[in-house]
Image: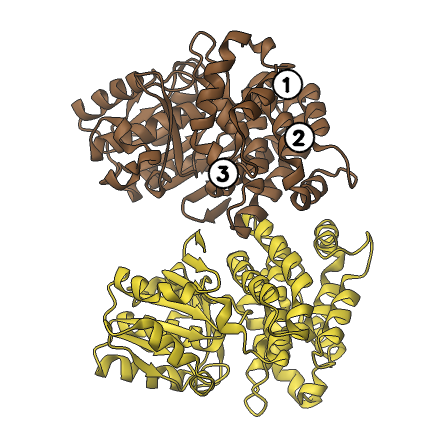
Chain colours: A brown, B yellow
Amino acid sequence: MATLTYLTTTHFDFGALETLPKMLAQEGITKPLIATDAGLVAAGVVQTVLDAIGPDFEPLVYDGTPGNPTEEAVKDALKLYTENGCDGIVALGGGSSMDLGKAVGLLAVSGGPLEQYDPLVGGAKRIKGVAPLIAVPTTSGTGSEVSIGFVIILEDGRKMTFASPHFIPKVAICDPELTMGLPAGMTAATGMDAITHCIEAFLTPQVNPPAEGIALDGLRRGWEYLPRAVKDGSDRDARWHMMMCSTEGALAFVKGLGAVHAMSHAAGRIRRLNPHHGTLNAVFLPAVLRFNQDVCEDKYVRLREAIGLPPGADLAEAVEGMNARIAIPSGLAAMGIEESDIPEMVEYAQQDLAARSNPRRASAQDYEAMIRSSL
Amino acid sequence: MATLTYLTTTHFDFGALETLPKMLAQEGITKPLIATDAGLVAAGVVQTVLDAIGPDFEPLVYDGTPGNPTEEAVKDALKLYTENGCDGIVALGGGSSMDLGKAVGLLAVSGGPLEQYDPLVGGAKRIKGVAPLIAVPTTSGTGSEVSIGFVIILEDGRKMTFASPHFIPKVAICDPELTMGLPAGMTAATGMDAITHCIEAFLTPQVNPPAEGIALDGLRRGWEYLPRAVKDGSDRDARWHMMMCSTEGALAFVKGLGAVHAMSHAAGRIRRLNPHHGTLNAVFLPAVLRFNQDVCEDKYVRLREAIGLPPGADLAEAVEGMNARIAIPSGLAAMGIEESDIPEMVEYAQQDLAARSNPRRASAQDYEAMIRSSL
């Protein structure tokens, strides 16, 4: 098994779940809250994890995490955590469950309300601490198991990104076995989330060459193995490499993200649709690659090289080809997004944390044009 | 200025030295021992650093670090540290000073003798702690400012590699300004050390894709900028990129190193010559690339790509070409190593920690053949 020691100690391989009781003991957790969702209970994954935890701990399960987690759900889970004297968190699931777990861990130690920690108004300074958290991803996309961030829809409707080194999990247990049952559609959507992380993180202008090296390794891997994982979910090699792509994407986006994420966060707020974050990223990526092209020529050379395109090939077209190959919806309209949603999306995209690190500054008109071309 | 937060918080850019007083305060150091060498005192670099530290601290200078640091020197520096009540270390210099500083920091907290910490006999478990250490490199090669290791020649003549996460500096201050005065020969030798780190770390079989991504980014950078830095030491861009290559090489070799380092450590023990570690790496690298070739075909494709070679090109020849271009000595004989040195070198190379992570297991005969072909 590979043990990657960056800021999160990551146990990575088939069978890594077996390390969970040892890691709970190491982190001093006796009564973990397992932050997860109902789908993983139904699929038997939660039981698998409870079995792995064994008899020496007193886990409690919160399974109410919605796709795109909400402040209401965070409060419900926090109540369970405090009323039962939990002393740590196992964040089990995709990005939604891991993000919810991070939010609960923050509020349990530093107190509410959540919005005071908004990094756009210096909220990171108010963090007093977080509860120990072990992240166990069940999808290969978000990389939240090693990332500095989490995203919650607040009660007032804002979709807020929180970011601080405090939110980097102490331990990640990346066991590709837990992703073997992921359906093709979800494999494709989460996989494109990971690929988008690698690309956007690589393109942000912040100086961090190690993160760029990690991003390109992740991109190369994701581009090769995502079609295999989508085509045959039982392809263990493909599942391993997609999970690594996901982890690398999040290690890389310590650099920041860009306009794809700004628009995906804006669209992710549309509650009547609750659209999948990874699918949104896949759909927005070609437009942003076209928008950024003129200011990123040197970096595009290396992106092409990583995914095996000939010099000068059109990156945006290559992503469109990948999207088609893995049956990502053809555009926002196919996801239910309408003309009338555009003004609010434009407004929120401009305000999003990720908008600040896009390599080319985008105006309201630019965002509108990118959204329209992604319809 | 770039701040890279991996395990070491690295402040990286021209002018980064200005952060030193703030970092001393952050680490709770009031009376730092500056572990350095006489050359840096003579060159005025130590005074520059003392000026940067300012009046709020009581630094002491140990300037007796030899090239290839010895246990005797470590003891001398430790005596100065303890007798003066120092509470932390600024390790200022190339690999020798940084490694000596790490050894002093270990002994100051965990006690001597050094050899008990030999990782080949489980010595890492005996580490009780280390003194806080801020690394300030003045060469671009070793990467010791972010590495888990240090190397000391023990009093009994063994050249011992110590490795533990404890030895990763808390803070690195990488200011390329401090390398501007490095002569061409030393720029070449240290630069090839960094390039060798990137290549050997990439080739070791341990599973750590993020480290491999970092290694390739560092290699690409070093290959492009080393000839420029050697040709014109005042080329600030080249100095910046070589320092980054060096940092990336050491971030990568958390994976391990290989036969090049095993032989360089063996040859570095020859006290009548005290040969430069980076020069030795440069000289041994072609032979090891030829030796490993058959078991590393996939990885050689990516190495060629990183340095801009056409598919199928001979990597070893490319390194020989680089060595010639930057005036690295033509072989071991030109460095004063003789036939009669070979048996002991073979013996030590096989026992070296780095030998364990070479992608192809090398016998005594293999080491002898590689050394002879490097003469």
Which residue was labeled with disc 3? A357
Going from N to C along the chain, the mark reached first, 2 or 3, is 2
Q: Position of residue A39 (x, y in %)?
A: 43, 14
Q: Is B163 left or right of B372, judged from the image as shown? A: left
Q: Subunit of mark 1? A: A
Residues tagged 1 and 2 counted as in contact (Cβ below 8 A): yes
Q: How many marks?
A: 3
Give me the residue at 30% from left, 62% from top.
B22
> Same chain for marks 2 and 3?
yes
Give me the residue at 21% from left, 78% from top.
B85
Residues tagged 2 and 3 counted as in contact (Cβ below 8 A): no
Mark 2 is surrounded, within 10 Å at the Cα level, by few (under 14), some (14 to 19) or many (20 or more) other residues, namely some
Q: Nearer the viewer, residue B194 or A229?
A: B194
Q: Which element is circle 2 on? A: helix
Q: Amino acid at mark 3?
A: Ser
Q: Amino acid at mark 1?
A: Ser
Q: Position of residue A21 (x, y in %)?
A: 34, 37
Which residue was labeled with disc 2? A290
Disc assigned to residue A373: 1
